[in-house]
Image: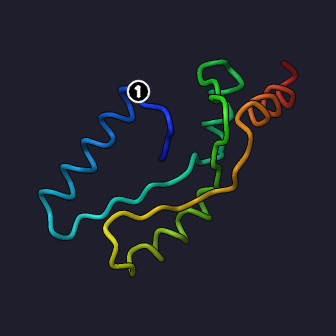
Amino acid sequence: TFDKFYDPYFKYKMKAELFLLETTETGLVIRIPTLLGKGFCQLVRDGKKIPRQGIMHFATVEFVVGKIFDCLNDANRIQYIWGEPVDACLIGNLIKFGAGK
């Protein structure tokens, strides 16, 4: 995932990426968008995950899997897969609306 907010999750994610790149010659970091599926939607609906302000990038699992294969053929060791940009508040409201909340 990629995030503009610096929190403990972001801090340790970056440390893990750096460790991988420094300790292996063939390590590959692939940063993916939020996967829009049942799990994410249930967390938002139940109030356990609140989308942050700003723009979030969403993609389906099928889309990301296809792009991962493309990343394997690229020489860069850090790859980004960009999803569809959506306003975070909008996606949260749509999920809650669909759940009748």
Q: Determine whether, in the image, residue 64 is placed left or right of residue 50.
A: left
The vertical placement of 11 against 86, above or below, is above
Please tell me whether mark 1 sits on a helix, a strand or a loop: loop
Q: Position of residue 16 (x, y in %)?
A: 25, 44
Examine the rendered structure and indicate whether residue 26 appears above or below residue 61. below
Q: Residue at x 50, y 40 (%)?
A: 3
Q: Residues within 10 Å of mark 1 (few under 14, many from 20)?
A: few
Q: Residue at x 39, y 35 (%)?
A: 10
Q: Residue 32 in the image: state x and y as whole percent.
A: 50, 54
Please name the residue that numbered disc 1 is placed on.
7
Q: Is residue 55 left or right of residue 7?
A: right
Q: Which image quadrant: the C terminus?
A: top right
Within the image, what quadrant is residue 87 found in?
top right
In the rendered structure, the answer to whether residue 61 lies left or right of residue 31 reads: right
The amino acid pointed to by label 1 is Asp
Q: Residue at x 72, y 25 (%)?
A: 45
Color encoding of the figure = rainbow
**Residue 98 picture location, percent across and down:** 85, 31
The residue under the point 53% across, 70% down is 67
Relative to residue 61, is residue 12 drawn left or right? Answer: left
Provide residue 60's location: percent of width, then percent of height: 64, 56
User: How many numbered marks appear?
Assistant: 1
